[in-house]
Amino acid sequence: MAPDGFSVDTAVEAVEAAIAAKKLSLLEAAYHDLASAPTDVLAAHSATIGPRLTALLPEMPQWHSAVYAVFVGALVEWQADAVACAPPILDGLQESLEDAIEFARLWRNRFGEDAELPEPTEMPSEEVQDRLGPDFGDVWHAPYFGWHTVHKWEMAAVAVLADRRVRRGLTNRDELLALIDRLEPDYGDLRCVQWALLLLDEEPLLVLDRASGRAFRMRMSGIAGNYQLQTLLAGALIGGGHLPGTAPSAEAVALSSVAEIDMKALDELPHTVECFNFAEPSGRWIWGESTPSRIPVVDGIRRLVLDPPVFTHAYQAVRFLPRVPGRLDLEEILEPAEAAPYFAGVQELMSVQEASRLAADGY
């Protein structure tokens, strides 16, 4: 528990003093005091202390910086300004990804291609550090702690990327995504930060409904996954009376857009059923487990082809990134005669067998 007479300002000043004195024990004690503070106190002061702590992250040792970054992420989820807090957090994410990639390379060079890597989410181990030998400090230190802090930087990064202003200002999105692609085969699932980086905002979308020959000009923002897009699309097109079928419930649509999600009762959230089979104009399937960024750009706009569902598949109506509101706006309806040019070149839907083969190959 936080000590009697606890002051958030005093606790932050203790962090600053610990860094100035280069005392890890003081830095850890200051963190303990902050983390032990009542939630309502932290929430009330988050707008002030978030940027102050964020500015100190580059001055901390590697492990401690990542631990404090997670704390800053929690402050952002209250009231701290994500834009002010984002740069050191996203820099830390990039550095940890780069270091973790280097760690995997060094590990395999030392112990063999088939050697099992340490569990990345566990605490750093003195036993492993001793195993790495006398050159640990010169060669292994940064890569090793990068390996063990990626998941912490991921949590902090997702918190700031929930703010579209941060996403709009990103200049190294492609670089971060490339690093994630390189690391994931060794590290494991980094989908939370990957999907946060792949979010599209104010993105035009041309939806082609094969059965009716109609097309729909739409605009999407903050939609993390294609199941979420399924729900919002069915709500707009079927619920709006533009296409036949059974629309998802109002609750399902709300949970896929802006309604608050009770993270303690995820199992109680409603399920809904796929109303469409998503495909590229080439006929290749676009699976629900992927993101809207997977929809190809054709002549400057993403084009999505709708077919009747091949499978009856129920899924939970929820946002993969609960703090990010999703929006899908219908801007224009094109009747068949007007839509016909956009159907030129649209190929027949790929067979289940071929689509499954491509999915097995990682497509």
Image (cartoon, rainbow, N blue to C red):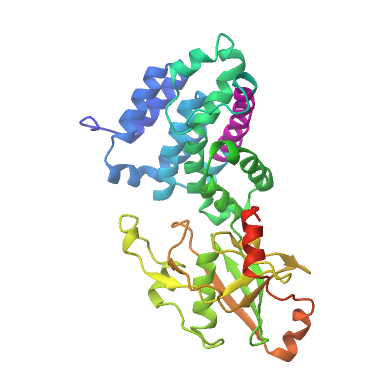
Query: Residue 263, how many percent across, how many down?
Result: 35, 55
Quarter of the rendering containing residue 11? top left
Reply yes or no: does residue 93 show up in magenta: yes
Q: Is residue 272 above or below residue 193?
A: below
User: In the picture provided, is 221 more to the left or to the right than 335?
Assistant: left
Residue positioned 55% across, 72% down in the render: 328
For the record, the magenta segment spans: 89-108
User: In the picture provided, is 32 more to the left or to the right than 136?
Assistant: left
Query: Residue 359, how many percent across, how many down?
Result: 62, 58
Q: In the image shown, does 159 or 250 lie closer to the viewer? A: 250
Task: Name the residue at the left extreme.
Answer: 4
Reply yes or no: does residue 245 show up in magenta: no
Residue positioned 33% across, 42% down in the render: 42
Asked if residue 79 shows in the view, the reply is no
Residue positioned 47% across, 31% down in the render: 119
Quarter of the rendering containing residue 215? bottom right
Q: Is residue 291 above or below residue 238?
A: above
Q: Is residue 44 above or below residue 66?
A: below
Q: Is residue 302 above or below residue 50?
A: below
Q: In the image shown, does 141 or 161 lie closer to the viewer? A: 141
Query: Residue 168, how many percent across, how many down?
Result: 62, 54
Query: Residue 142, how many percent across, how many down?
Result: 57, 23
Q: In the image shown, does 59 or 130 lie closer to the viewer? A: 130
Q: Quadrant of the C terminus?
A: bottom right
Residue positioned 55% across, 37% down in the render: 187
Asked if residue 182 shows in the view, the reply is yes
Task: Name the residue at the top extreme.
Answer: 134
